[in-house]
Image (spheres, helix red, strand yellow):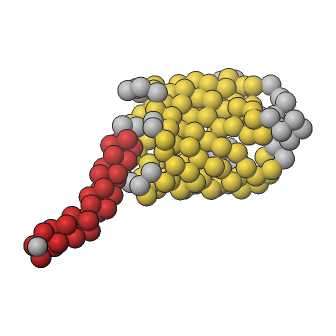
Amino acid sequence: MHAQFLTALTAALCLPIATAGAAMAAEGDFLKSMDGKWSGSGTVLTRIGGKSVNVRCNVDFAAGATDLAMQGSCRALAIVSRSISAALKASGTRYSGTYTGPSGQPSSLSGNRQGQSINLAVRWARDINGDRHATMTIAKLGENRVRLQTIDNDPTSGKSVVTSSIDLRQ
């Protein structure tokens, strides 16, 4: 009886550790699937209500077991180029980190992974489109495709507006 109790207790105590280890392995596998050089195109709104601009981007992702770094640049009109970067840290399926866009000022990111997408709340370093909040998604679309997308609220209508959507291929 005592041996059965110890076995059950040991299993109960070890299960959360094993589950956490499996979750970290799953996140590591997911992150590492994005490792490498990516390029593609998309559109960016310079401001809500303005015209969208076509962009071509080159992005390098560097992934570890619990982190993802992104470094790249996007070019519009063949003459304007802007750097972008992000650094994310995973704790289970929760993510936090920073994003630095064309302004050069780091903005905070926090969110989680659901399926093949990392969904992040953005707290911009300065007011953009009337406030400092938006959402960003890094979505794995199959083996060799990733979409980077930001969505903001139109301060006039309150509706969600896609402010950037960039599809990358490896």
Say which of 142 and 125 sits in front.
142
From where the camera sits, is residue 77 visible?
yes
**Quadrant in the rendering for residue 35:** top left
For residue 63, side relative to residue 2 (left or right)? right
In the picture, the quarter occupied by the C terminus is top left
Say which of 92 and 67 sits in front.
92
In the picture, the quarter occupied by the N terminus is bottom left
Q: Residue at x 29, y 52 (%)?
A: 22
Q: Residue at x 41, y 55 (%)?
A: 92
Tell me where residue 159 appears, x and y as whole percent.
80, 35
For residue 152, side relative to residue 72 (left or right)? right
Total number of numbered discs in the rendering:
0
Please tell me whether residue 111 is drawn above or below residue 143 in the rendered image: below
Tell me where residue 12 appears, x and y as whole percent.
26, 65
Tell me where residue 56 appears, x and y as whole percent.
59, 26
Please tell me whether residue 128 is drawn above or below residue 41 in the rendered image: below
Say which of 12 and 82 sits in front.
12
The residue most toward the bottom is 2
For residue 161, side relative to residue 150 (left or right)? right
Q: Residue at x 41, y 25 (%)?
A: 142
From where the camera sits, is residue 47 visible?
no
Tell me where residue 122 appears, x and y as whole percent.
65, 50
Please tell me whether residue 158 is drawn above or below residue 121 in the rendered image: above
**Quadrant in the rendering for residue 57:** top right
**Quadrant in the rendering for residue 16:** bottom left
The residue most toward the right is 156
Say which of 90 and 84 sits in front.
90
